[in-house]
């Protein structure tokens, strides 16, 4: 069985907008997949379906053997503990330090301080922020905040890392650094990465599998390195 | 272990956010204080109304006059029959001899009564009945009237019935008042705490996104709500205990009570502690309820 599998998925929002239609998709373990498309093409919706922020209107979504579409509201946390999510706007808690932000999810799972500490420090090491543990998010640059977000996402060693436009708010140089961090996680930890982005430079440079979404439909699925930027999005 | 850790962290987080969101915490606490003071006033008022009406009801007695020539054995039999009536709490028997003696000892009446010979006695044997429930007074009186050798039964007839229905009205009124105030408290505190929590919607969203279970998200908020309730009930409780005791001490000295002995403030002994406990529970429960309600809204997709 595939790690991620979408079968004939439709998503129609309450206001009548069809965000996704007849999506069929399989993603293997340890893969690194880009999902690209214009604004409002439905790529964010696709990512949201994977962590059950949205429910498919029709079809089935399976992540690591969990039927996400049928997951009850009160059980979502079980899925999310297996997934790391990186957001465009970082979603850090402003009143907690870097260390506390990364430790927070683990604390809420009920782990002890002794179990949490090595995980947090390892995650911060992985993103290169070991020296900023006591800073608050407001004292960090955008790139650093995104690193904290990534550290928080990988602290519990998830099998899947979902990234929703992680470089959307960053300059090209910082974007590259962030992508390097994410690629390193994919290679060293074997974490499956699914990333929605519209940054063509990144997609072009990294030569990964690329899935193109256009107006809610699957418009192309390019194997590793076969996608070129002039096949415009 | 895990449960205790989560509980411990919830307590810590609840205290932290109480302090971090100081102004909103204060708003919730002040709102709680104001409404609980109102509830306290309503409670004390209703206690007193109940106390006064009960006192007045206790003063209501039935007076029975026996026929003039009733023999002592028949009087005794009547007494036994009266004792058998369920609604009778207490019987005071006054023989016509006793009454005559009483008048003899009264300066105003002595001269008149003294003109009577030893055997001459215009008075009647009588009973004074204290009854258990004023509402059943009519049936009790009917039963008594049907007994033998009874000449007259007096109990203030229509005025008693009127009084009883007025008292019932007042009692229901105060209960409705307290109920209404409690409702206002629930609505006001719920809304204030809702606003407090709405400002932290982002925080709750993030918690959900990183895989915190709904229960664990809710816990610190419930604790926070309870703390707001407890903190908010301190002043109203002090107000109840000391304010009411002071009021009671000031009023008991006054001579208003000479006119109508039963209209006086109820003793604060049990009342203030009952009321305080009620305020504490109300504050705590409403605080938790409001928090739970407010968080719940953010926990559904």
Image (cartoon, rainbow, N blue to C red):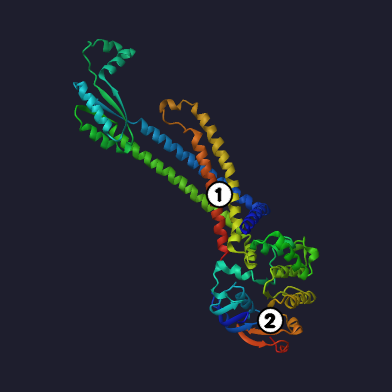
Residue A23 pos. (x, y %): 59, 83
Q: Chain of mark 1?
A: B
Q: Quadrant of residue B198?
A: bottom right
Label 2: which secondary element: strand
Residue at numbered disc 1: B284
| Mark 1 Cα shell of 10 Å, populated few (<14), some (14-19), many (≥20) | many
Indicate left or right for A44 with B254 as reference.
right
Q: Are marks 1 and 2 on the same chain?
A: no
Q: Which mark is residue A33?
A: 2
Residue visible at 63% across and 60% down in the picture: B200
Residue visible at 54% across and 39% down in the picture: B240
Q: Which mark is residue A66?
A: none
**Where's the C terminus of chain A, which quadrant?**
bottom right
Indicate left or right for B177 with A55 as reference.
left
Q: Is residue B91 above or below residue A3?
A: above
Q: Chain of mark 2?
A: A
- Between A186 and B229, the one nearer to me in the picture: A186
Q: Is residue B157 above or below residue A8?
A: above
Residue B210 pos. (x, y %): 65, 67
Q: Quadrant of residue B136?
A: top left
- Between B251 and B16, the one nearer to me in the picture: B16
């Amino acid at each position: 069985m595939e790690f991620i599998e979408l079968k004939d998925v439709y998503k129609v929002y309450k206001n009548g907008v069809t965000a996704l239609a007849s999506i069929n998709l399989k993603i293997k373990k340890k893969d690194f997949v880009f999902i690209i498309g214009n604004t409002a093409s439905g790529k964010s919706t696709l990512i949201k379906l994977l962590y059950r922020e949205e429910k498919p209107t029709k079809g089935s979504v399976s992540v690591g053997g969990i039927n996400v579409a049928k997951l009850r509201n009160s059980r979502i946390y079980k899925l999310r503990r297996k997934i790391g999510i990186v957001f465009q706007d970082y979603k850090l808690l402003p009143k907690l330090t870097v260390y506390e932000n990364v430790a927070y999810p683990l604390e809420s799972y009920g782990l002890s301080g002794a179990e949490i500490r090595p995980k947090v420090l390892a995650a911060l090491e992985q993103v290169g922020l070991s020296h900023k543990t006591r800073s608050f998010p407001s004292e960090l640059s955008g790139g650093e905040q995104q690193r904290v977000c990534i550290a928080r996402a990988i602290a519990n060693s998830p099998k899947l890392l979902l990234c929703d436009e992680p470089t959307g708010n960053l300059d090209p140089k910082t974007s590259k650094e962030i992508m390097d961090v994410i690629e390193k996680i994919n290679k060293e930890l074997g974490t499956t990465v699914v990333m929605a982005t519209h940054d063509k430079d990144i997609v072009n440079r990294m030569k990964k599998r690329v899935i193109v979404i256009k107006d809610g439909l699957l418009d192309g699925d390019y194997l590793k390195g076969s996608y070129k930027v002039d096949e415009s999005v | 272990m895990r449960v205790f850790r989560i509980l411990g962290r919830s307590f810590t987080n609840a205290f932290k956010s109480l302090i971090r969101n100081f102004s909103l915490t204060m708003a919730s606490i002040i709102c709680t204080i104001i409404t609980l003071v109102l509830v306290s006033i309503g409670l004390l008022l209703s206690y007193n109304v109940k106390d006064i009406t009960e006192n007045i009801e206790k003063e209501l007695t039935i007076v029975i006059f026996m026929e003039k020539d009733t023999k002592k054995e028949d009087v005794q039999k009547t007494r036994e029959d009266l004792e058998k009536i369920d609604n009778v709490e207490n019987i005071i028997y006054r023989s016509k001899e006793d009454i005559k003696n009483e008048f003899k000892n009264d300066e105003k009446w002595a001269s008149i009564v003294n003109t009577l010979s030893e055997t001459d006695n215009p008075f009647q044997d009588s009973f004074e009945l204290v009854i258990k429930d004023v509402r059943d007074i009519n049936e009790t009186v009917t039963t008594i009237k049907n007994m033998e050798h009874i000449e007259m039964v007096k109990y203030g007839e229509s005025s008693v019935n009127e009084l009883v229905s007025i008292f019932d009205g007042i009692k229901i009124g105060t209960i409705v008042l307290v109920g209404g105030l409690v409702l206002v408290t629930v609505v006001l505190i719920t809304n204030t705490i809702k606003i407090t929590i709405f400002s932290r919607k982002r925080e709750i969203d993030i918690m959900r996104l990183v895989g915190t279970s709904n229960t664990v998200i809710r816990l610190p908020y419930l604790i926070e709500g309870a703390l707001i309730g407890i903190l908010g009930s301190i002043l109203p409780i002090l107000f109840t205990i000391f304010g009411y005791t002071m009021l009671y001490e000031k009023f008991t000295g006054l001579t208003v009570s000479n006119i109508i002995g039963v209209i006086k403030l109820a003793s604060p002994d049990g009342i203030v502690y009952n009321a305080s406990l009620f305020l504490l529970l109300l504050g705590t429960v409403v605080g938790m309820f409001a928090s739970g309600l407010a968080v719940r809204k953010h926990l559904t997709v």
